[in-house]
Amino acid sequence: MATAVYPGSFDPVTKGHLDIIERAASLVDELVVAVLKNNAKTPLFSEEERVKMIKDVTGHIPNVRVESFSGLSVEFAKQCGAKFIVRGLRAVTDFEYELQMAQTNRSLCPEVDTLFFATDLNYAYISSTITKEIGSYGGDISGFVPEQLVDQVYEKIASRQRNESRQTGK
Ligand code: ADP
């Protein structure tokens, strides 16, 4: 049985992520989407919220499981009995970092290989960061995140903006 782990921040999950999830899931027996807990930057959504959002948009794919993890992706992949780590490549700017990560992971754990998916051109410009940026200025994010998450993303951004302005007294 071939299991793959797709690790990431997914803050929030985007249409680009979902495309990779669908394509990767069609190639393996089980795909574990793994939400990283210990982000360096403070995420907009809590780990529980990010897991729930991914579950909400992947319900139609039977061989997808969503988990959260902390620590090294490669260790989590080993724990899951996974042969592969899945990553998406949007542009050459992703390439250098992703290649370094894949080589590092391979030296740490040669039995887990990295599978790269070239991003669908329709989603190549999408990132979680740009989604939050556009949303924070009230721009249209319906092309960026799956439809059922659009309101939730706007609400979360608005609630963070309210908290920030309360703190700064503006
Ligand atoms: P990380 O913080 O680990 O980069 P992300 O949630 O930003 O987590 O991304 C997880 C993975 O999904 C990475 O491999 C990233 O390149 C890929 N990815 C991000 N956005 C897209 C997209 N629009 N299309 C395809 N892959 C993407």
Image (cartoon, rainbow, N blue to C red):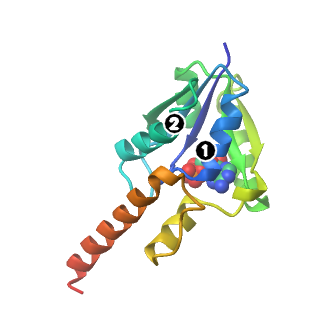
Please tell me how crowded label 2 is: few (under 14), some (14-19), or many (20+) other residues with Cα within 10 Å.
Answer: many
User: Where 44 falls versus 83 (above or below)?
Assistant: below
Mark 1 C-beta closer than 8 Å to ligand 1: no
Please tell me how crowded label 1 is: few (under 14), some (14-19), or many (20+) other residues with Cα within 10 Å.
Answer: some
Label 2 secondary element = strand
At 57% from the left and 67% from the top, the residue drawn is 130
Which amino acid, mark 2?
Ala
Q: Identify residue for label 1.
A: 18
**Farthest bottom residue in view:** 170
Quadrant of residue 152 within the rendered picture: bottom left
Which marked residue is nearer to the observer: mark 2 or mark 1?
Answer: 1
User: Where 54 falls versus 134 (above or below)?
Assistant: above
Q: Is residue 42 visible?
A: no
Give the image location of residue 68, x and y in percent.
43, 36
Q: Distance between the residues labelled 2 and 1?
A: 13 Å
Label 1 secondary element = helix
Quadrant of residue 123 within the rendered picture: bottom right
Lateral position of residue 51 relative to residue 82, left or right: left
* Residue toward you, 162 or 56: 56
